[in-house]
Every structure is written in C-alpha cells, then in structure tokens.
Image: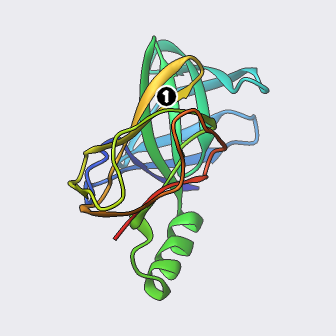
Amino acid sequence: MRYYVNLDPTPGAPPILVDLVELPSGRLEVHLDGRPIEVDVVEVTAERRQLSVRVGGQVVDLTTEGTPPEIGAVASGHRSYVRVESERMRSAEQAKKSTVAGGDKVVKSPMPGRVVKVLVAKGDGVEVGQGLLVLEAMKMENEVKARVAGTVADVHVAAGAAVEGGAKLVTLA
C-alpha cells in the first residue's frame, strides 16, 4: 500500500512516498521515496496507541493520536503533526474536491481535546499558518493553524469546550 506523508503543513508541500508491503512472515518491506529502509514495528499498547519502532537500527517509542489523514505523533518527547493519506484516501479526496470546492476552509480538530483559547473572531482576516485556537490534548497545548488564507466566517467553539477529533472548529471564507 502506498502512503503519502506530509510533515510540512504548508499547502502544496511535496509529500514523502512510503510504500509498505506486509510479508507472509509478518515483517514489513518499506520503501521511502523509492529507497528500501529497514523497519520493524511492535505495538506496545493498542488502547493508548503506543508503538516501538526500529528504523535502520535506531529504536523510537512512538505514541499516535487522531485519525488519518491528520495524525499527531509524540516521539522522543517531541510532538508533531503529520498528514498521512493512503492512495485510496487521496483518490476519494480528489473526487470530493472536484465536486465541492473550498474543503480546506473548514478547520477541524486533529484530535479530541479541550479548547483552551480562541485566537480569532468572526470577520478577522487570517494568513496561512496563523494560529486560530489552542487545543489541549494529553496535557499538552497545541496551536491549530490555518491551512489557507481567508476571513473567519464562523467560530464553532468557545474556550473551555470539549471537542472530538474531526469536530468543526472554524470556517474560513
């Protein structure tokens, strides 16, 4: 299965191509942008989504949160957000974009959490990468940023609100 992994939130940034094949032995055959890479993954706990990943001889403990395509990952004490799309997800998204324009204008919660602070109000102009609100998840505060420039058409949450992953936070026009 091919996955498109984007570590850079800038719109139009090129993704990393990850090809995964599960072998009959259960091991993974992985190619990163066409180059083979030695990887071994062991699930530590399913309910907390913790993995132990060995990449090229180096072991990293990894905790994931959220649901694809927007995934949060904590590795070696550092939190990052990545966009991971399978070929199937990407095809479905392209089909949806061809029929419905402006999909990036609805900002959704990348994970369940609590809104700590709303940084924008209806009518505010925002630029790409500008903070829209602060979301607390797993005792860490995360700034949710705009992926496109626009004007805030609606703010769907208030400070203190609990949200599920995928919940509408802000709509841009």
Secondary structure of the residue carrying tag 1 is loop
Quarter occupied by residue 124: bottom left
What kind of colouring is applied to the model shown? rainbow
**Amino acid found under the numbered disc labelled 1:** Glu
Residue to which mark 1 is pinned: 38
Compared to residue 134, the image places residue 21 above or below, namely below
Residue at left 44%, top 23%? 79
Quarter occupied by residue 52: top right
With 88 as the anchor, is 150 left or right in this view? left
Quarter occupied by residue 111: top right
Residue 14, position in %: x, y? 27, 55
Residue 51, position in %: x, y? 64, 22
Residue at left 52%, top 73%? 91
Residue 34, position in %: x, y? 37, 49
For the residue pair 43 and 98, the one nearer the viewer reads as 98
Residue at left 43%, top 29%? 142
